[in-house]
Amino acid sequence: MRSGLLIAFEGIDGTGKSTQLPLLAAYLRGLGSTVVETREPTDGPHGQRIRALYRNRNQASPEEELELFLLDRRQHVAECIRPALEQGMIVLTDRYYFSTAAYQGAAGCDPAQVFARHDFAPEPDLVLLLTLPVEESVLRIRDLRGESPNDFEQQEQLEKVAALFASFPHSCIVRIHAARPVAEVQSSIRAAVQQLLMRKGV
């Protein structure tokens, strides 16, 4: 049984997910909702192993990488997402299994099989897919973050990831044009969430 709502922020790196999620959380709390903010990979043992791959992705094969994401997500669902949903909370997650299908799909895994292996994970009520040209994404990573793109953020890789995100047909996905000012992007996000709240009678 679940009575809460699960909203996932998705998109290639640099689209502003980590900026937009807390803004939405504050807005929802202002409406009186209890909100859980979370992210993947988690800070758990499997998530830490995944983060080590950012510096050297060659440490694992695509299948081994996928297994790490599945282990991390199983723990995330069991310890955070499902209990919060059962208590009627709104869970906002920065990345979910759509990212795994896109990133590990770009690395050679079959996206359809990736989705099929997530039968343990609650389906999101809404996926906010932030879209941005890959060139701008890489510029944001370098200029705004002051970072060099990691092994998951190389432009050729991100082109494949973006194409896979664009191909996903799931009805829960709402695409949000993320090249606009932060406030405009947040306005579009809130509009999509308001429609969800109305449908769910929240």
Image (cartoon, rainbow, N blue to C red):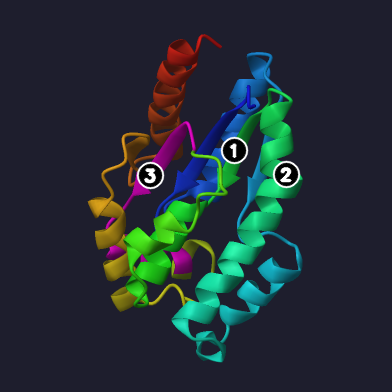
Pointers 2 and 1 in contact (C-beta within 8 Å): no
- Residue 103 placement, left or right of 41: left
Badge 3 amino acid:
Leu
**Residue 13 visible:** no
**Residue 132 visible:** yes
Badge 2 amino acid:
Cys
Magenta region, residue range: 124-141
Q: Which residue is mark 3?
A: 129
Tell me how many marks there are: 3
How busy is the neighbourhood of tag 2: few (under 14 within 10 Å), some, or many (20 plus)? some
Label 2 vs 3, first from the N-terminus? 2
Badge 1 amino acid:
Leu
Q: Does residue 29 lie above or below 63 as drawn?
A: above
What x and y, as percent, mark residue 148? 50, 78
CA–CA distance in space, label 2 to label 1: 11 Å
**Image point 55% across, 45% down: which residue?**
19
Question: Toward the viewer: 87 or 140?
Answer: 87
What x and y, as percent, mark residue 182? 45, 39
Element marked by disc 2: helix
How busy is the neighbourhood of tag 1: few (under 14 within 10 Å), some, or many (20 plus)? many
Question: Toward the viewer: 58 or 63?
Answer: 63
Label 3 vs 1, first from the N-terminus? 1
Question: Toward the viewer: 143 or 89?
Answer: 89
**Image point 43% across, 30% down: which residue?**
189
Q: Which residue is mark 1?
A: 92
